[in-house]
Amino acid sequence: MIGRGVSRLRRMRPASPAPAEALPIPPIEMRQLVGPTDPADYDNPTRSLVFPYLPARAFESVFDFGCGCGRVARQLIQQEPRPVRYLGIDLHRGMIEWCRVNLAPHAPDFAFLHHDVFNMFFNPGKKPAVRAFAAEDGAFTLVNATSVFTHLPQGHAEHYLHEARRVLTPDGILHASWFLFDRVDFPMLTRNAHALYASDVDPTAAVLFSREWLRECARAAGFTIYDVIAPPIRGYQWLVLMTPTRPGVEEVELPPDEAPRGTIDLPDMPENPSRIGLD
């Protein structure tokens, strides 16, 4: 593993990070759609690994599921060493177009694709509920899914766990955030119901999954949960790290949520959010 990691790092080094001042910051109306609005959250002035708890070899080739307006992409462009390949997909066409125009020219090995699936606010119209990733099997060392599975209905989450496994290398990493709950606290749920939905208008506004379901669904997709990072606020996003199941990788327990209680100030949905960046 050490020798393989060194080889990968050598392949990553030739791409020079772009200077921060050359990279545009996404407009505020896009930042409000994805959550973080502070420009500092889109920057990487130290050129360090964007997720410092992951091994450097994981950043060789990155598939960014739900790349939004390029927060992680912008940080990775500045990262040293920079990934030799990056593919970001998102269902919001305007944000993908912004990334293509403003970020891709600074990193020739970075590409952005519109994942044309239905969302009542971000991508309305007659569209399929899910699609396969526009990527070949075993092509990426890292699949990043920040604030994505937190907005997927149960069946969609199952589909995309399998897709993430398909596009990962045998020792790749799925880095994803989740809202989790303990099923024992909700005895009224039927046997096959493993998700709670925060909105009766838009089920994708926020989706919580039972811990038991996540473990079993990960196993069914061919993953092992090997590390977990608890949320800073109770009930908020857990970072769950998975890797393809193989000898020598041990599954870890999901610890209890003992974070302090708090609130997150989220902006209201603007009018016609799917048109932002297109009109």
Image (spheres, grey):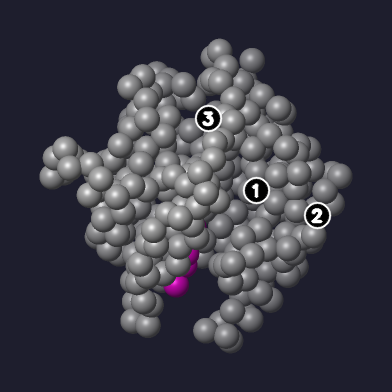
Q: Which mark is residue 73?
A: 1
Q: Residues within 10 Å of mark 3 (few under 14, many from 20)?
A: many
Quarter of the image holding residue 13? bottom right
The residue that appears at 84% across and 51% down in the rendered structure is: 19
Specify whether residue 138 is in view.
no
Name the residue located 26 percent from the left edge and 55 percent from the top edge. Answer: 212
* Magenta stretch encompasses residue 188: no
Give the magenta range: 171-175
The amino acid on which the numbered mark 3 sits, given as a three-letter code, is His
Point 72% across, 37% down: residue: 38
Does the CB distance between marks 3 and 2 fall below 8 Å?
A: no
Q: Position of residue 180 (x, y in %)?
A: 37, 48
Inspect the image, locate mark 2, and give the three-letter code of the amino acid beneath it: Pro
Query: What residue does disc 3 label?
Result: 92
Describe the element under mark 2 as helix, strand or loop.
loop
Mark earlier in primary sequence (1, 2): 2
Labels 3 and 1: the sequence-earlier one = 1
Q: SS class of the residue under badge 3?
A: loop
The quadrant in which the C terminus is found is top right
Is 59 left or right of 107, judged from the image as shown?
left
Q: Main secondary structure of the magenta part?
A: strand
Q: Label 2, on which residue?
A: 45
